[in-house]
Image: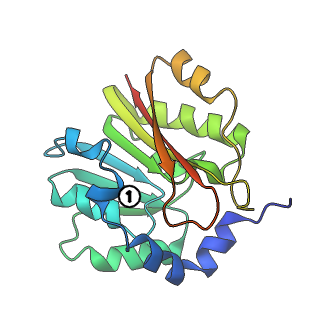
């Protein structure tokens, strides 16, 4: 199956994607981890921020948020919802995150529903890059969708977990179950990577 370029797909279809993303509540969709986090004063990086739903939630809970997405349309949409201008919105993409060249010390990095749009090789590069941006006791939250019929998505790198462990992460894998809004078998996995 030929892969579609996710950048052009997301840029051209951002209106329908925003509508879909905003149907979900941040606390509900991330209930397996979000209730355990006190966001007050945390420095949070939201990679693949999309419609801004999660970034706006983190900021509303007291976090200092940097939100990154590769879609200029998504960034414009999300920025318009940031009425108090609390979030640093940046157009950039994994695996490089060139805009964060001199950044580090994020307490929490959320990369939810983004990793599967990177090739297995890029997934490893992205993991290493996110590791560089974390503070000493930081966490990375990643969700990964396995959908063999999605011609935008890749499989998870077979060395992803081993690479995370070699970087010093404690890896917790949570079965996210079947996507209830899909017409075919789509499975989600949550990775909580803690230093």
Left or right: 133, with 153 as reference point: left
The quadrant of the picture occupied by the C terminus is top left
User: In the image, what residue occupies the spot 64% across and 34% down?
Assistant: 124
The quadrant of the picture occupied by the N terminus is bottom right
Q: Residues within 10 Å of mark 1 (few under 14, many from 20)?
A: many
How many dots with numbers?
1
Look at the numbered disc 1 and give the secondary structure of its residue.
strand
Relative depth, front residue between 171 and 175: 175
- x, y percentage for residue 137? 30, 24
Would you place residue 8 above or below residue 46 in this image? Answer: below
User: In the image, what residue occupies the spot 34% across and 74% down?
Assistant: 79
- x, y percentage for residue 175? 47, 39
Q: Is residue 87 visible?
A: no
Would you place residue 46 above or below residue 84 in this image? Answer: above
- x, y percentage for residue 131? 47, 31
**Residue receiving disc 1:** 67
Would you place residue 13 above or below residue 104 in this image? Answer: below
User: In the image, what residue occupies the spot 33% across and 30% down?
Assistant: 138
Q: Is residue 178 visible?
A: yes
Relative depth, front residue between 32 and 97: 32
- x, y percentage for residue 90? 43, 62
Left or right: 128, with 23 as reference point: right
């Amino acid at each position: 199956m030929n892969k579609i370029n996710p950048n052009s797909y997301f840029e051209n279809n951002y209106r329908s994607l925003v509508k879909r993303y905003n149907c979900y509540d941040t606390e509900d969709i991330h209930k397996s981890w979000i209730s355990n986090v006190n966001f007050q004063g945390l420095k949070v990086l939201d990679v693949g921020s999309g419609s801004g739903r999660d970034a706006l939630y983190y900021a509303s809970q007291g976090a200092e948020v940097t939100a990154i997405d590769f879609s200029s349309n998504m960034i414009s949409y999300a920025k318009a919802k940031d009425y108090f201008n609390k979030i640093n919105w940046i157009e950039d993409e994994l695996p490089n995150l060139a805009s964060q060249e001199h950044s580090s010390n994020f307490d929490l990095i959320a990369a939810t529903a983004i990793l599967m749009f990177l090739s297995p090789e890029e997934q490893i590069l992205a993991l290493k890059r996110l590791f560089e941006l974390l503070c000493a006791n930081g966490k990375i939250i990643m969700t990964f969708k396995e959908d063999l019929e999605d011609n935008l998505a890749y499989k998870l790198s077979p060395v992803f977990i081993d690479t995370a462990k070699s970087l010093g992460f404690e890896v917790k894998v949570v079965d996210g179950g079947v996507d209830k809004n899909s017409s075919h078998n789509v499975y989600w996995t949550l990775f909580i990577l803690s230093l």
